[in-house]
Amino acid sequence: MIGTARSLRGLTIAFLCLFLTVTTLAGLGTFFATLSMINVLVDKRIAFESAELAPTGTGLSRGELVRRIRELTSQRDTGDLGLLLTDAQGRTIIGNTRFSRALPSGFSSLNRQDRIEGLSAGRVFVRDLHGGMRLAVFAETEPIDDYFSARKLIYITGFGAIVLVVLIGLLLFRRLIGQRIEAMRTTVESIIDGDLSQRVPVVGDGGEFDQQAAAFNRMLDRIGQLMAEVRNVSNDISHELRTPLARLRNELALLEQRSDAEPLRDQLALATAQADDLLGMFGALLRIAEIESGARRAGFRSLDFDALIADIADMVRPLAEDDNQRLIVGPCNAGTLVGDRQLLSQLLHNLLENALRHGPEGTTVRISAERGDHGVVLVVTDDGPGISQDQRALVLRRFGRIERRGSGHGLGLPLADAIARLHCGTLTLGDAGPEGGLKITVVLPA
Amino acid sequence: MSLHILLVEDDRQLQRQLAAQLSQFGHEVQAADDGRKALVLLGQHAFDILILDWMLPHLDGIDLLRQLRESGMNVPVLMLTALGQIPDKLEGFEAGADDYVVKPVDALELNARLHALLRARRVTEQPTDTVSAGDILVSPTRVLAWRGGQALNLSRTEFNLLLELVRADGQVVTRAMLIERIWGHDFVPTTNIIDSHVKHLRAKLIQHGDDPIGTVRGIGYQLRA
């Protein structure tokens, strides 16, 4: 029970079971307690009446007893009271009732099967008097017909109504809590997807849930503020550094064009190229920032992913041919998906270009796409050196290059990763096979 | 071709550098550092082209452009934008911009685009089935190309590359322009993908004569007249 009570559903079921058990026990308890209470009261009454008629130890004569019984039945309303005085042979001396069977001494219960003349079910008190005479005093425990079944009905409807009200209340309560939690979960999921503008709805009743939602929203405001500050700082750095760098680059380009710069022209061209490289890095950083802001989701369109793969493969193929590498486009059955054409092109380009650039001469790079259970699965494999397990996280980090030589900013894979995430997808690195080689799997929800 | 250019840019240093660089290409450049001054100059002179920064004090570049188009001024406009403003870019095209250059601006890139822009305006006035440069003939409608009367066996990309070079009429076509026009991408690959495609095209062209493609280092290509 404790194990299942950890969830809202489990708690509801546990509470309900407990409630039903207690209610049923209470109902049955009350029912039988009332029943025995009536018996006790009736027993008291018949014992009292019996003692009134024939006080213990007085040994009243048969005539006196008959007189007292007659007097009692004539003076008082004894409609529910049965009296019977019998002699030693069991014959009736006087009485207003008959019993269908012989009764033992003391208290006993009689029901309808006992067919008491003129009366229904009840209790009887039998006393042995002197001379073999027996006095039986009977009183009904059911003041009206079908009292027992009526009482059963009262109990069932009464307790049933309580059970029903509690049940409905519980379900409503559970639904209310469920809805509020669901609203919060939806918000959290939107935020995970990069939409930091989402907030938990506040109903406005000022209750605990509203307070909780308001606190949660304040936390989101704060996180959003911090994120914006961090993003602004990195954007500002990129922008602010880009502007003077561009000026420097333009100044170098101007110098390069001057007629008296001839002896330094090569060095100036090299310096310009280096400045271009730096500008390219800032460009890529700003591009990642733009992607991570999620703003480009607004421009998502349905597109033919297979055709896009073919286009980009054609675009990068000469790179492979120049280095005696092979680029094989495998089966592409992805169909259409919704996304940003420019960014998905860049993702495909970056993955292929990365595989070709890092692979030695003779490398084979394969690209294929299929439609899986979770969307489109794009796989790019190569038979190059691969990336060891412990370095995989590094290459997905900005500037996380493994080798310091060679071209590239170390922003190609982080950019591809950011593009996959913008599309609510994932990018994972793995081994292409036992002989090594890198396998990059991108899953994009279709 | 000397052009009369109005450069609207509020960054004084960038304005000075760009004006100097464009002058080096033989253009006559007048500069304004905000939208209002630009409007005054546009009223006083006839410009061949307007280079317009997006973000300007007093009157935004995009608002200035809208005003121009609404008043029926058809001067070609090339806009300068900051990076990462793709939605704005579409807004700019709708407002009537002819082309874009993302800052920081490279003078050679800018110059190549200015020429391409004016050329595009002229071309639309006189459509023809084939375009030619020297002994190279290209038919965009039939997707065929010839050199010295002999058919060239080109891939689709090589054909598009040649078509862009021929259309440029001896002017420089930059890598970014080629990426944009051939593949429709807004990113410039870090590696020499374009160089590689040009190398393949060049190999096919020199089977029928001298190498007609000149490389403008770090910028792009042009057909030698």
Image (cartoon, coloured by chain):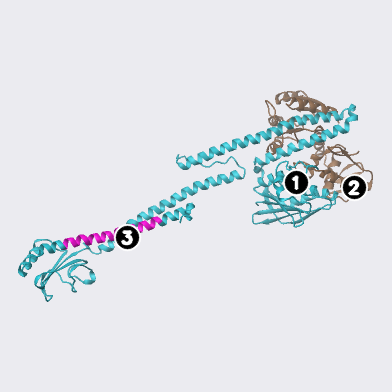
Chain appearing in brown on the rendered image: B
Asked if the stretch drawn in magenta spans residue A24, the answer is yes
User: Is there one chain holding both mark 3 and mark 2?
Assistant: no
Q: Amino acid at mark 1?
A: Asn
Disc 3 target residue: A28
**Does residue B6 appear left or right of residue A169 in this picture?**
right
Which label lies toward us, 2 or 1? 1
Asked if the stretch drawn in magenta spans residue A116, the answer is no
* Sooner in the amino-acid sequence: mark 1 or mark 3: 3
Report helix, strand or loop for mark 2.
helix
User: Is there one chain holding both mark 1 and mark 3?
Assistant: yes
Location of residue A244 in the rendering, given as x and y in whole percent from the top left corner:
75, 29
Location of residue A243 in the rendering, given as x and y in whole percent from the top left corner:
74, 30
Report helix, strand or loop for mark 1.
helix
**What subunit carries mark 1?**
A
Location of the N terminus of chain B by quadrant is top right
| Structural crowding at the residue carrying mark 1, measured as other residues with C-alpha within 10 Å and reported as few (<14), some (14–19) or many (≥20) | many
**Does residue A27 appear left or right of residue A124 in this picture?**
right
User: Is there one chain holding both mark 2 and mark 1?
Assistant: no
Disc 1 target residue: A350
Above or below A296: residue A38: below
Q: CA distance from mark 2 to mark 1?
A: 27 Å
Q: Which residues are magenta?
A: A18-46
Q: CA distance from mark 3 to mark 2?
A: 101 Å
Disc 2 target residue: B203
Q: Amino acid at mark 3?
A: Leu
